[in-house]
Amino acid sequence: QVQLVESGGGLVQAGGSLRLSCAASGSGFSINTMGWYRQAPGKQRELVATITSGDRTNSADSVKGRFTISLDNAKNTVYLEINSLKPEDTAVYYCYSLLVIATSTRRYWGPGIQVTVSS
């Protein structure tokens, strides 16, 4: 049974920084891709950034230059360094993973973690 455990969210002032972490626990899998999506109140869930096990990254234009994603394959953990936070970054951030299990791939989502940016 794979679980994603997120940490690092909270309340921060505009211009501040946070570091989100998401660890995939369990056994019998390898990482294809991990990343983060977010959902603000009244809006659809949107891509923030993803990273493959080969360190290929993809990120939304709105976060480029402010958010940095990284992956520790040995710890099955993805990190999101968030700098220069803006009130519009307020959202629930969801960890995402695409894992290889045997000969197939499966998607998993974390429960979500709140990030609130005050102006």
Image (cartoon, helix red, strand yellow):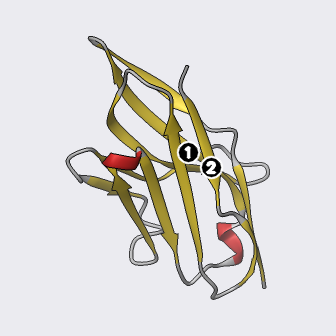
Residue type, mark 1 in image:
Cys
User: Is residue 13 or residue 21 the one in the foreground?
Assistant: 21
Left/right of residue 105 with respect to residue 115 in the rendered view: left
Q: Which residue is mark 2?
A: 6
Q: Quadrant of residue 70?
A: bottom left
Q: Position of residue 119 (x, y in %)?
A: 78, 85
Q: Earlier in the sequence, mark 2 or mark 1?
A: 2
Determine the secondary structure under disc 1: strand
Marks 2 and 1, how far apart at CA = 7 Å
Q: Which residue is at the front of the view, 51 or 6? A: 6
Task: Give SS at disc 2.
Answer: strand
Indicate left or right for 65 with 47 as reference: left
The residue that appears at 33% across and 47% down in the rendered structure is 74
Q: Are marks 2 and 1 in contact (CB under 8 Å)?
A: yes
Determine whether 110 is above or below 60 in the image. Answer: above
Between circles 2 and 1, the one closer to the viewer is: 2
Q: Amino acid at mark 2?
A: Glu
Rendered location of residue 118, percent (x, y): 79, 80
Residue named by callout 1: 95
Name the foreground residue: 15 vs 8: 8
